[in-house]
Amino acid sequence: MKFSFSKVLPASVLLLGIFLRVLIAPFTLNWDLLANSRLITEWGILPIAEFYKQPLAAYPPLLYGLLKIVLQISQFISGNQLFSWLSLHDVALLHHPHVFRLLLLLKTPYLLAEILTAIVLTKLFEPKYETRVLLLWMLSPFIFFTIAIWSNIDIFPLCALIVSLFFVKKKLPFAASVSLGISVALKMFPVFIFPFLFFYQKHKFQKLQVLIGFVLPILITHLPVLTLGQYWSHTITSGYSKQILYTILPIGPDRALVYYYLVYFLLLFHFIRKSITDFSDYLFYALATFVPLFILSRFNLQWILWIAPLFIVYQILVPKPNTFWLFLTLAFFALVGASQSSLNIGMLAPIESTFWVWDWPLKQKLGGELTTMLLNNAHTLFSGVLIWITYLVYKYALKSHATT
Amino acid sequence: MRRLDLLQPVADDEVNVGVQSNVSQSFIPQHANLSSIQLRVSNPDLQGNKSYLVAILDQNHKLLRSLVVTDANLGWEAPLRFDFAPIANSNKQLFFLTISQIPQIPEASTSAKSLGISTSTQDLYPDGSLLINNQKAPGDLTFQMFYQTSAGEFIKDSLIDFKKHASADPGFITVFVVVEILLLWLMLKRLTKIGAGKRT
């Protein structure tokens, strides 16, 4: 009997995905989850100016506000032990008798947001691809690594972004712009997509509509921090922003071109010039916005989540995608493997706490120079295959109706 | 491979090691082959030329292992890692870790700033005590202690400890197993339906 994706019901795929996530989530931990959760417990307790004085407070107020509510519910479900557990020292927390249940509880909102994202993502494609998209998402090593294991907080703004794309497809520009505004109100990253949404609209009234729909949620949720310099310095000019805009071309004294912006503007001008009207094309440009960031900066590994939907578009649209997808996966996980242990084996610390205190075993073994060379090679391969994949998606997106 | 044996992670205070004061911590390893100790130090005299003796003594205060470090080896709020030949019979034995400044001729010393060692304010390590100039003091040193083991033993010990840890929360493990079986059963039921549909 020949196996066919289209014969497998989406519900089975969802169940398989949930099974795998529940299997791994209680036994893995990244420091980010602890740091963010500890920070969120202080939201609403500390005055907002004091809150944003903390070096890790780099997200907009909406994200902290939402997650504080979620955390309060989790605290209630845990029988009021979650907050006291979070206040323990890292390794003491790992030895807590209820560590596995508390980790699953803490990760559940992330997993729910991820599943919602997957379901909405399937709606961006033709119904015949539904099961395949779901399968690609649920079994994607990138998604599995960044959410079930890492608990990347970016899943919340990404979810809002995918909802925005769904509304674009449904030809509901105002709803799309509000969703995109909410996404930006959760994290600044997707702000670069707005010009594409704006120029995608053909009439002046629609353009005005999307501008209002986009700005309103950002403005409303930023009212408490509008005049807070500390907030803006953390979110706009923080270390992460500097990291993204690191690659520059000096053109004179105190003057340089920022490569990311340069590529971004070229992409935007290309979009405007082509007068894009097809959703497949819009989808490509919206998702490709993040690509230069991964080629031109020493990106944080968990950010891979932002281009994971592009990989799925690639796997759906491009014939015979497996070879390059394999190269991409190998390059990314080579980067993960060669990084400090907290980004790879250290995440198994709930099972073996020694991993939590390991520093960077590979670097200690190979030395700094060789480790850097390994990372550089892996990043170069990753960039090369990412450019190639993006080109293939571009080539096939423009003549595909898979998303219509 | 080295595996974590003992740990006192809290560092909310500091004690100083100087010419007039040495610091000790008693401890009881839970495994044989103790082979590494990591402390947290703050050296305010990065360009100094003072030397310190880090030593492990047995319960009779006999010197077992030692390391001499200088100001040049010690950073500000940095780990001090002391790796040594494994102590074969360390399991459940009492030991002392001492840190003391090695006396120098006066002109060799350029600064009176003393080395800080991270501690907890409270007694958090129940099997040992912090000693300052051999007198019991409140708190404990901040430390990580490791024992040497083979890769096979490392995995075996990890799995044994993981099993113990998981069985400390039987309520969760029961719910976890039931939920996983339920998810698998539902998935298989769906797939069987598809199979039946195809045959008809």
Image (cartoon, helix red, strand yellow):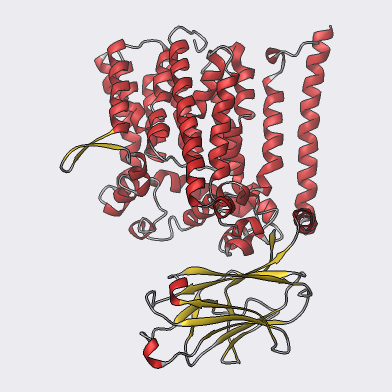
Numbered-mark total: 0
Task: Indicate left or right for A4 with A316 as reference.
Answer: right
Q: Quadrant of residue A319?
A: top right
Task: Indicate left or right for B71 with A361 as reference.
Answer: left
Q: Position of residue A374 (x, y in %)?
A: 51, 41
Q: Quadrant of residue A47?
A: bottom left
Position of residue A249 relative to residue B21, above or below, is above
Closer-to-camera residue (A134/B175): A134
Closer-to-camera residue (A273/B35): B35
Whether residue A173 is visible:
yes
Which residue is situated farthest in the left direction here?
A: A253
Q: Please name the residue shown 36% across and 10% down the image.
A: A277
Q: Quadrant of residue B180?
A: top right
Position of residue B143 relative to residue A254, above or below, is below
Query: In the rendered view of the protein, which quadrant contains the N terminus of chain B?
Result: bottom right
Q: Position of residue A390 (x, y in %)?
A: 45, 21
Q: Please name the residue shown 52% across and 19% down the image.
A: A314
Whether residue A198 is visible:
no
Query: In the rendered view of the protein, which quadrant contains the C terminus of chain B?
Result: top right
Closer-to-camera residue (A320/B189): A320
Position of residue B136 relative to residue A380, above or below, is below
Q: Please name the residue shown 63% across and 64% down the image.
A: A92
Task: Indicate left or right for A233 with A381 as reference.
Answer: left
Q: Position of residue A259 (x, y in %)?
A: 30, 32
Task: Indicate left or right for A133 with B2 as reference.
Answer: left
Q: Position of residue A48 (x, y in %)?
A: 36, 56
